[in-house]
Image (cartoon, coloured by chain):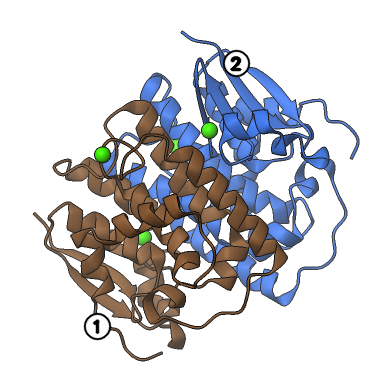
Chain colours: A brown, B blue
Amino acid sequence: MSELNLYVDTQYASPYAMSAFVALTEKRLTFSMIAIDLGIDENHTEAYAETSITGRVPTLVDGDFSLSESSAIAEYLEEKYPTNAIYPKQLQKRARARQIQAWLRSDLMPIRQERSTEVIFYQAKTQPLSEQAQLAAQKLFRTANQLITIPSEYLFEDWCIADVDLALMLNRLILAGDDVPERLVAYAKYQWQRPSVQLWLNQKRPLL
Amino acid sequence: MSELNLYVDTQYASPYAMSAFVALTEKRLTFSMIAIDLGIDENHTEAYAETSITGRVPTLVDGDFSLSESSAIAEYLEEKYPTNAIYPKQLQKRARARQIQAWLRSDLMPIRQERSTEVIFYQAKTQPLSEQAQLAAQKLFRTANQLITIPSEYLFEDWCIADVDLALMLNRLILAGDDVPERLVAYAKYQWQRPSVQLWLNQKRPLL
Ligand SMILES: [Ca+2]
Ligand SMILES: [Ca+2]
Ligand SMILES: [Ca+2]
Ligand SMILES: [Ca+2]
């Protein structure tokens, strides 16, 4: 097996770096992390542009192949290392997991702006949600309630990588002290106890 | 085979509806389109919330299963109907196609804001690019130049769905009259001639 390296941000605060980290950890793969400092534009160096193509974190380097975008990384790991599945096996459920991942990466912008992941990883203080962000929160709650359909601790029968992404979005609000329906709080808390998630939460972070 | 329906926007101006339409067309699948008017919030009805979960277009309905997010729809179609591939077969190229799709859906926001797809589908007039959008355009050009590595009309040996998405992003600028490197103009023009793309371009659109 070739050497695996994951480029992450120095603060371990990127939700997408977290998602890729959890995917690798759930796969029981041995990998190293290389932290780059977005604050001083280390992602804009020529070397990192070559590796990442888009200058973003996370980027996975697997031997002579490098790949960015956490959802693409998760799919790649699932295909190359199928043991310890991170996506549902069933076609429709796998499709739904992908829908959830894509949606969380492209919608709910007001929540992402007003509840940065520094709330989650640095207990940052926040202002009350704007009206726009409150509307986005209502959409998140309605959607999450519709998605978590079975009386289960997960979206589907078994854990999958979309559970981490959905829990992270909910925790932007929960950990800021915003009102979140109890059922969704329980769901997010349960995801947060997962060892692969705890391993990310417990990374030694520099002061902001 | 169950009945396939694709929910799109009334203006046929959503780049993601276009991507799903092209995916279905490339698969040579028979499907109907149902246009919903985002201008009068038809995507916020309870019925559409139930179908789409997230209230977005496109949503594919395949028998009793419905799915939104164009990248999830493309993956679902590829898995359920493997004939006429829309993703590369080779692991690393498929991964790169997914990276490109995910990147185009989550980055380059200033271009998406200042060069809405009305530029493409309605020849809308535009203002000069802001400084932020110019920086995003430079990033797009650098990235596209790095991605189109082989002297080919496509990203990879064969056409794939990511070619449509990348060409659409380039065409936001090209069709607005912005300066775009000649090589990338040639690439985008070539993608635009594809019959599945032409079929979308030639949809009868209501006046704005
Ligand atoms: Ca890469
Ligand atoms: Ca369970
Ligand atoms: Ca759906
Ligand atoms: Ca070729």
Chain name for mark 1: A
Q: Quadrant of ligand 2?
A: top left
Q: Nearer the viewer, residue B85 or B81?
A: B81
Badge 2: how crowded within 10 Å, few (<14), some, or many (20+)? some
Marks 2 and 1: which is nearer the front? 1
Q: Quadrant of the N terminus of chain A?
A: bottom left
Within 8 Å: ligand 1 and the Cβ of disc 1? no
Distance of mark 2 from mark 1, alpha carbons? 52 Å
Q: Residue at x 21, y 61 (%)?
A: A196
Q: Position of residue B82 (x, y in %)?
A: 37, 21
Q: Of the numbered discs in the image, which one, if any, rests on residue B31?
A: 2
Q: Position of residue A41 (x, y in %)?
A: 45, 83
Farthest bottom residue in view: A207
Above or below: residue B187 compared with residue B179: above
Q: Please report, as a chain letter, where disc 2 is located.
A: B
Residue at numbered disc 1: A204
Could you tell whether A85 is left or right of B105 in the image? left
The residue under label 1 is which amino acid type? Lys
Which structural element holds mark 1?
Answer: loop
Q: Position of residue B60 (x, y in %)?
A: 56, 27
Q: Is residue B148 above or below residue B207?
A: below
- Which residue is farthest front? A182
Q: Is residue A41 above or below residue B114?
A: below
In depth, the one of A61 and A200 nearer the eye is: A200
Left or right of A68 on screen, residue B59: right
Residues tagged 2 and 1 counted as in contact (Cβ below 8 A): no
* Percent coordinates x, y for residue A81 in the rendering: 17, 45
Does label 2 point to a residue whose CB lies under 8 Å from ligand 3?
Answer: no
Q: Secondary structure at mark 2?
A: loop
Marks counted in the figure total: 2
Name the side, left or right, on which B13 lies relative to A207.
right
Q: Is residue A182 visible?
A: yes
